[in-house]
Image (spheres, rainbow, N blue to C red):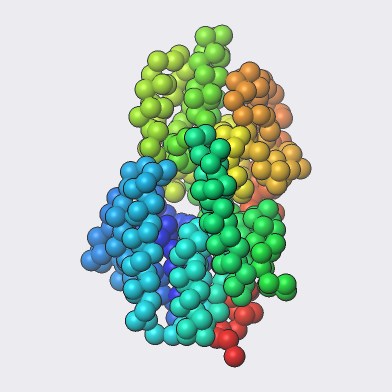
Amino acid sequence: MTILFIWNYHYFPFEKGKSRFSDFLDELAAKGHDVEVVCSTFYHMGKSFRDVSDPRLACLPYKTTLIPELGYKKNISFRRWRSIRAFNRGVERFLSNHDGVDEVYIPIPSNELALIGERFAQRVGAKVILDIEDLWPESFRMIKAVRPFYRPLFGKSEKRRARTLAQADGLVAVSQTYLNLGLASAKAGTPAVSAPIGADVEYVRALQMQHVSKKKPGEFWVGYIGTLSKSYDLYTVIDALDALAIAHFDNFVLKIMGSGPNLEDVRKYASKKHGKVEFLGLLPYNAMCEVLFDCDVGLNPIIATSVSSLINKIADYAACSVPVINTQQSAEYRSLLANYEAGWNIWPKDVIALQKALVFALKHPEQLIKAKQGALSLAVNELNRADSQRKMLGLIESLGGKKQ
């Protein structure tokens, strides 16, 4: 089959490392499908622009087309909205001259991009699979100033998403929570699978077999991976470590791996406190895993208003056998963490609860070992990317190409 994959947030293996979609697209090509990837000239993760003549693009097992985008520095900004609009218009122009394909695969958001893809699919008789990666516009409820005006600002956007989902021939979602939302708007009987982003567990375990620890005796490493933005409350984390340091708990070292719009603010805040905090930057995937292997616990300090579900970092923590102290309010993730005894659920912004969880993990090594085992079981049984890919590939091939 000929398959067109469209998403402005896609990143290539040589940019950050293995990802849900880079592995997935490689597998589609390996199975003999003719795949084309349409993405942006702007690299969202690194907030930088790609070189369209990069020779590494030609080495990929699928065709690539880069659509110009304006770019932006902040994830929540008017500039980002304009940038996405520019990309969507560019995709629309590109598809107006594109030959027919059998299937179109579009992760969402953006819902507008999905509608553009669906119009193209209707014109050429292709089937459409939508992959729900995040909830837009609900994510904007995290912005305090937006909440009173959410309904008049984003009511139309919710209706647009419902229309988009209703036209899909198949649905994928990164969690059962998101899939249930999608099915509420989809046609009755629409084929659908829950396929968490997950981690490449076999790859990570192979890395760990070669790992040599760099942790000093007596240190207790606390890891954070991901974006430094308003969605993640690292200030409470730093406050907790500050209080513990003042109380003469000198074991704790916070390792922050990632980048984002709040990096300098967080760095400045940490510099005024007593806790040990190291900023390691945005690391290649294997280097990130090497640090996580030495971490005793990981952090998922999402703010209370977030609508996120099974996000990237939780699978990476689990695959590296790192139990998590979690503030995320997703019922699905909190249940998984509790059922596998793979960490500790606490409330957001509760600095005392965070201190207690850290000290408990430090003083109860036997419980920490059990939690590490639980984390790996969680990765193997629930967050294994190979299982997700099998579901996604099965759905694509079961749809069988063009509409009759």
245 versus 29 height, above or below: above
Q: Quadrant of residue 323?
A: top right
Task: Indicate the quadrant containing the C terminus: top left, top right, bottom left or bottom right.
Answer: bottom right
Query: At x 71% / y 43%, what residue is drawn?
Result: 331
Q: Seen in the image, is 163 located left or right of residue 13?
A: right
Q: Nearer the viewer, residue 57 or 97?
A: 97
Question: Is 52 drawn above or below residue 329 in the view shown?
Answer: below
| Residue at image location 31% in from the left, 52% down from the top | 71
Residue 134 higher or lower than 341, as above or below: below
- State the image coordinates of residue 299 (x, y, percent, origin top left): 56, 34
Residue at 62% x, 48% y: name it: 309
Question: Most extreme residue toward the top, as rendered?
Answer: 247
Examine the image and state in which quarter residue 147 appears.
top right
Regarding residue 299, the answer to whether it shows in the image is no
- Judge left or right: residue 168 versus residue 114: right
Q: Position of residue 37 (x, y in %)?
A: 40, 70
In the image, 288 versus 315, the foreground residue is 315
Give the residue drawn at x 65%, y 61%: 182
**Residue furthest out toward the front:** 152
Q: Is residue 52 visible?
A: yes
